Amino acid sequence: MREYLLTLCITAAVTYLLTGPVRKFAIVAGAMPEIRARDVHREPTPRLGGIAMFFGLCAGLLVADHLANLSTVFENSNEPRALLSGAALIWLIGVLDDKFEIDALIKLGGQMIAAGVMVMQGLTILWLPIPGVGSVALTQWQGTLLTVALVVITINAVNFVDGLDGLAAGMVCIASAAFFLYAYRVWVSYGIEAAAPATLFSAILMGMCLGFLPHNMHPARIFMGDSGSMLIGLVLAAGAISITGQVDPDALKLFAGSEKAAVHQTVPVYIPLLLPLTIIAIPAADLVLAIVRRTWRGQSPFAADRGHLHHRLLEIGHSHSRAVLIMYFWSALIAFGALAYSVNSASMWIVLGIVFLSAIGLALLLLPRFTPRTPRWAQAFVPPRYRRPAAVSEPAATTPQAPGGEDEAEPRTPVAAGAARVNGATALGARSRFLDRRKAGSSR
């Protein structure tokens, strides 16, 4: 566990330290697309955050290769090298898309090629544990097609949910944390070496997301772009592929009897094998609703609009930060609920706890304008928006006015893009607290 924590910390530190220079590079390189009508942010924000995340991935794998216990993962398996090869290819495609916005079909082809590269190096699904049937061996073509489909779906699901500041990185971090706990339990508790690469992948993925989140939380100073969203989506899928179909039910030794009976009775154990795909639950629901909504209006299913779930949360009155936290809550409930159910599926308290937390989540959705106020003794530890307003004992001082009766204002000097001393999430000057929303061309 200490080596996993060291790998996680090194990955997070490298990602965090490189994100600042990468942001300056993105500004100089002009990787700052114009604001579209469907965008939520109101200021030009640089992309290419995936560059820092990729080097964090490389640093994590390099450190793990030189540790005493984790080095055996590289000796006994070729999966870390397969992950690095596929990640490098998908990262290059993402960087090109962040700068030049390549065609969607080209990106899809690149995703399939990256998945094929990993399959050629041994990172593939060998068999599937099916309840009531047993372990079903897959042919080479079946395993390849299933692996490519899983990679493409996961990559696009992460890319699809990347619509608010810090949303994709946080949801992937939550899913990888739950998956790490399960994979580590399978490896250490049951001694199944096939779970070791997946445990390493999830630890590195957590470090990538945690190192990038401080720069990406609202208001975001940099976006991960497709170079980051496709990268973490591929790492997320690699963890699922690495462990799915390689865990023998009889090796768990939970139940005696035939393999068919073991698979049937260990269904809760196999639920967390799909934990990396829990991030797809929310985007998949959003995708289905978007297709139905656009088709009903006579539009193309691929036409962009502002009807996604995170847009709806903003429209009903939730702030940007609260909408992200609500999405975090539901992702954690799905991921850790499945993890808890796998540990003890017979406990009624787990089911009741999930139902109770779901009720809390629904209540949060219905209270968009409720702002909690903390006690006065704890106000120093919370953001200003949650503090109680101070009592006004003296009249407010009048603002000095110019001779013509107008308020005296300091002259503002515009700052050119790429100039020094740029703050906030913008490269054009200081951030204004109240922005003119009409400039974005949206209804919000």
Image: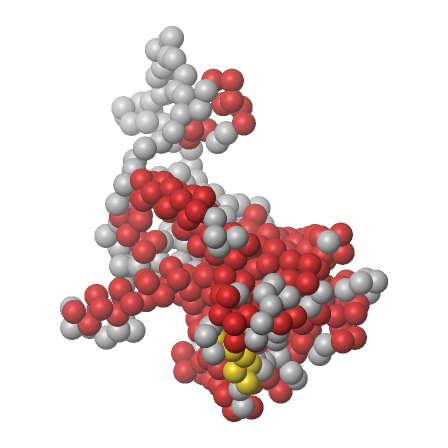
Front-lying residue, 122 or 30: 122
Left or right, 52 with respect to 72, comes to: left
Q: Position of residue 330 (x, y in %)?
A: 41, 51
Coloring scheme used:
secondary structure
Q: Position of residue 32 (x, y in %)?
A: 47, 62
Q: Residue at x 32, y 56 (%)?
A: 309
Residue situated furthest front in the rendering: 257
Front-lying residue, 358 or 177: 358
Count of labels in the image: 0
Q: Position of residue 244 (x, y in %)?
A: 56, 73
Q: Residue at x 59, y 52 (%)?
A: 210
Front-lying residue, 333 or 439: 333
User: Residue 365, located in which quarter of the rendered image?
Assistant: top left
- Tell me if residue 432 comes above or below residue 77 in the rendering: above
Q: Quadrant of the N terminus?
A: bottom right
- Tell me if residue 116 comes above or below residue 326 in the rendering: below
